[in-house]
Image (cartoon, rainbow, N blue to C red):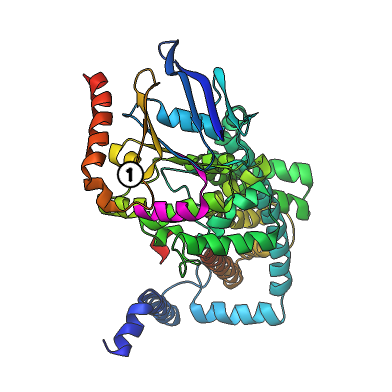
Amino acid sequence: MKLAIDHVSKNYRLDRESREVPALVDVSLSVDDGEFMAIVGPSGCGKTSLMSIVAGLLPFEKGTVSIDGNPIQGPGVDRAVVFQHASLLPWRTVSGNIRYGMELQRRFDAATMTERTEYFTKLVGLGGFERHYPSELSGGMQQRTNLARALAADPVVLLMDEPFAALDAQTREFMQSELLKIWAQTRKTVLFITHQINEAVYLADRVAVMSSRPGRLKGLFTIPFGRPRTLALKRDPKFLEIEDEIWKLIEEEQR
Amino acid sequence: MNPKQSFYKRYDGLILGAISVLLVLAVWEIIWELGWISPLFFSGPSAVAKQFRETLLHGTLLSDMAYSGKNFALGFLFASVAGIVFGIIFGWYRWIRLLSNPFVNAFYSMPRIAMVPLIIMWFGIGMWSKVFTVFLFAFFPILVNTVAGVKALDPDLLRAARAYCATDWQIFTTVALPGSVPFILTGIRQGVSLGLIGIVISEMFGGSEGIGFMVAYGGQTFQTDTLFVGVVVIASAGILFTWLAEKLERRFSRWKPEHH
């Protein structure tokens, strides 16, 4: 087990009403080594809170999160986050941004950082765009940079927080296949958050479904498809069946 | 498109600006030559040019410029360093900002000329009263703009930096400082113009050297041509420094989409 989320609860304080509102209640989830785990749920289910907690950016009241058995305390070099908004430094080029995570973590010497920057720039398909600034890139290319920055930092667990949510539908589909190709070459342990059921089913080995208000874990699905997967899979009857099952679970509570 | 047209389009600001300046100078010179204006109260372009040459070659123009320039540079350097350092501190820490706000606002909006006699009392009529006046004039716009820059930092970038284990110092050097640079440079540009006012004012109030003194002395002794030479030098310095500051601003904002 690579990443273990163990009985985590999180309350939010509403200043105006001076009362605590539960955002996450007793969430437990474990992700195996090299596994692609997706968490899907409606907005307000606390999936982004859960991601921030695992990233070490958000304090929480109860439970533990551990990686390789070590409980996390704040952000760490064992994790890297791919954010929903690319969050690239606008005054740095693509290369500079991919290098940035490594620079902050100071685990590699300068020569290794340069080497890794080059390797991951090519891996995410940004060869030739090294000297471009983020403002010169499309949304999809910005997210590739965001992904390369995270991969280059060589995390134990890769955290992805709705990375394709802001992209248009076609770019999103394309980026999903690209992500699978890139992931196949790195085989990182991934925790991927999304509100799109078919994105979760298409990408993941297992899909955890969350309910909203308060955020609870409601179901866990093992996705039976082998890899590599192609976009045609999304029209497979078995795929649609799983998608439907997850949808029913979410819909149940929306009513 | 023929090349003449594209040349005009590229430099239309410069060309039209030059034409308008030359036109005004020509009309002014004609009126001056016709003797319609009294040389006691006004001067003409040719007279100013002659006096410029005269004070440059045989007078104190160069040493006055050097004196003013040195004091301005010193005061402006202090103002920039202090303005950026305090601006980042005030922008970053809300409670320090709230503590300092009343004073910053008071000094930023008050006519700082009122402080000049007091500054002369403190520092005497030597160079340090000039340096401090420039500092006082230039410091606040740099401070206020830097604070605005730090407050406007993208929270997503700060969050990303934290997620990658950035230390406070790393956040400062890789996010806070470069992110506020466009604001800092706006402050610098405003600080330059206000600092120039500061140097001239402080030399007019007391002392015996510098361009401001030259203007005041020229006025008191009815050497209108000399007075005009001083005004022209100050105006040219203003144009030159503002142009430099704008160039610097563009240089550091080239990653912004509107500059491509």
The residue drawn where x is 37% and y is 47% is A226
Q: Position of residue A166 (x, y in %)?
A: 33, 45
Along the horizontal axis of the image, is B120 left or right of A242?
right
Q: Secondary structure at mark 1?
A: helix
Name the residue nearer the viewer: A177 or B63.
A177
To which chain does the residue with label 1 belong?
Answer: A
- Name the kind of residue labelled 1 in the image: Tyr
Q: In which quadrant will I find the C terminus of chain B? A: bottom left
Q: For the point 73% across and 63% down, which residue is it?
A: B70
Q: Determine the main secondary structure of the stretch shown in magenta.
A: helix
> Does B53 sit left or right of B109 as displayed?
right
- Place residue A71 in its image quadrant: top right
Residue A228 in the image: x percent, y percent? 38, 53
Q: Is residue B26 magenta?
A: no
Q: Quadrant of the N terminus of chain B?
A: bottom left
Above-or-below relation of B114 to B36: above
Residue B173 visible at all: no
Q: Which residues are magenta?
A: A177-191
The residue carrying mark 1 is A202
